Amino acid sequence: MDSEWPAKALAKIGRGILRMRLFWGWSQADLEHRSGVDQTTISRLERGVQRGLSLRRLAKILDALRVGDVLFEKPPTVPQTDLEIMLYGDRWNRAVTEADRRLHWPAPPEPVEDTDAWIGDAG
């Protein structure tokens, strides 16, 4: 297995945590106080060099940051042809739907239209 992949995954997790911490305007010390995970671990995690982080500590950090869904993007693959989609459906959408069904997760809400554009135009 490519040893580069775990490092890439750690870097992506760390980048996401750093983005959320900066979004809230918190220092690493603030996040330490809110999560109970020490600042040194948070620093290493944000830089993608923390090894052996338990899922429990990662969950504490994510909860403190008020992270909503953690979404995995569709993997880079050769796009399905129109015929393949017609015959077999969209593999990614099918996988997402099936995973949610198996885990008893509710269906995502329908997108809400931005009505501000037409509300004030009745003139």
Image (cartoon, rainbow, N blue to C red):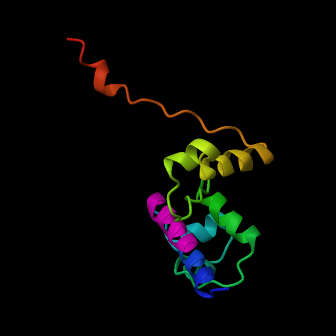
Classify the position of the N terminus by image quarter. bottom right
Residue found at x 50% / y 46% = 82
Q: Main secondary structure of the magenta part?
A: helix
Position above or below: 31 against 46 = above
In terms of depth relative to the viewer, which is nearer, 42 or 50?
50
Residue 2 appears in which quarter of the rendering?
bottom right
Question: Quick check: 53 left or right of 82?
Answer: right
| 15 within the magenta span | yes
Residue 68 visible in the shown view:
no
Position above or below: 87 against 25 = above
Residue 69: image location, x then y, percent: 62, 52
Q: Residue furthest left?
A: 123
Residue found at x 42% / y 29% = 113
Position above or below: 71 against 100 = below
| 114 within the magenta span | no
Residue found at x 78% / y 43% = 104
Position above or below: 76 against 1 = above
In terms of depth relative to the viewer, which is nearer, 16 or 34?
16
Residue found at x 56% / y 63% = 75
In terms of depth relative to the viewer, which is nearer, 116 or 61?
116
Residue 48: image location, x then y, percent: 56, 81
Question: Quick check: 118 left or right of 68?
Answer: left
Residue numbers of the magenta segment:
12-24
Residue 42 appears in which quarter of the rendering?
bottom right
Q: Residue furthest bottom?
A: 3
